[in-house]
Image: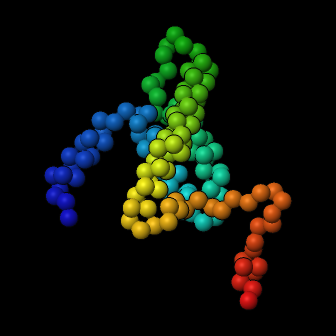
Amino acid sequence: MPDLNQILTLFDKLQGISGEGLIVIACLAIGYGLRYWPWFPNKMIPFAVMTFATFAYPVLADPKVATQPFRVWLVRNICIGFIIGAGSWLLHFLVIRRIEKLVITKFGGNGDTGNTQQFSKDETVPTNTQQNKP
């Protein structure tokens, strides 16, 4: 078990992270949480992550500047939040997913990262009753 001083040092480092960095970390955590929640479709995770970041960034952004109209401040921060959400999804899609596959294959896995199986529009998706037939 780690020493209490090590844990406190880690929390001090987390407090130094900017709001944008915290949103990226939260987006990755939310994405992984939704990925392993069986009732949430995996193809909706990017939308959920980008939506979270879109509304979370204005909460963490600097207060409105007195010379700037509120609508300009709000639209600007919503757009920045959306870009942060899209960037965190791309970070996972292009970098972290490759690292996952590498680690899984190194330790005896088959390279499957838990994504749901994809079907074309012409195929029928098997239901539980169709899969369990003898």
Q: Nearer the viewer, residue 15 or 122?
A: 122
Q: Nearer the viewer, residue 45 or 68?
A: 45
Q: Residue at x 60, y 18 (%)?
A: 72
Q: Quadrant of residue 118?
A: bottom right
Kindly give the residue lying farthest to the top in the view shown.
Answer: 67
Q: Position of residue 134 (x, y in %)?
A: 73, 89
- Is 123 positioned to the left or the right of 2 in the image? right
Query: Can you see residue 7?
Result: yes
Q: Residue at x 54, y 28 (%)?
A: 80
Q: Position of residue 109 (x, y in %)?
A: 45, 67
Q: Quadrant of residue 126?
A: bottom right
Kindly give the residue lying farthest to the bottom in the view shown.
Answer: 134
Position of residue 86 relative to residue 114, above or below, is above
Colouring scheme, one of rainbow, by chain, secondary structure, one colour: rainbow
Q: Position of residue 31 (x, y in %)?
A: 53, 51
Q: Residue at x 44, y 25 (%)?
A: 62
Q: Position of residue 121 (x, y in %)?
A: 81, 57
Q: Residue at x 58, y 15 (%)?
A: 69
Position of residue 100 relative to residue 46, above or below, is below
Q: Quadrant of residue 130?
A: bottom right
Query: Can you see residue 52?
Result: no
Position of residue 130 relative to residue 33, above or below, is below
Number of marks present in the image shown: 0
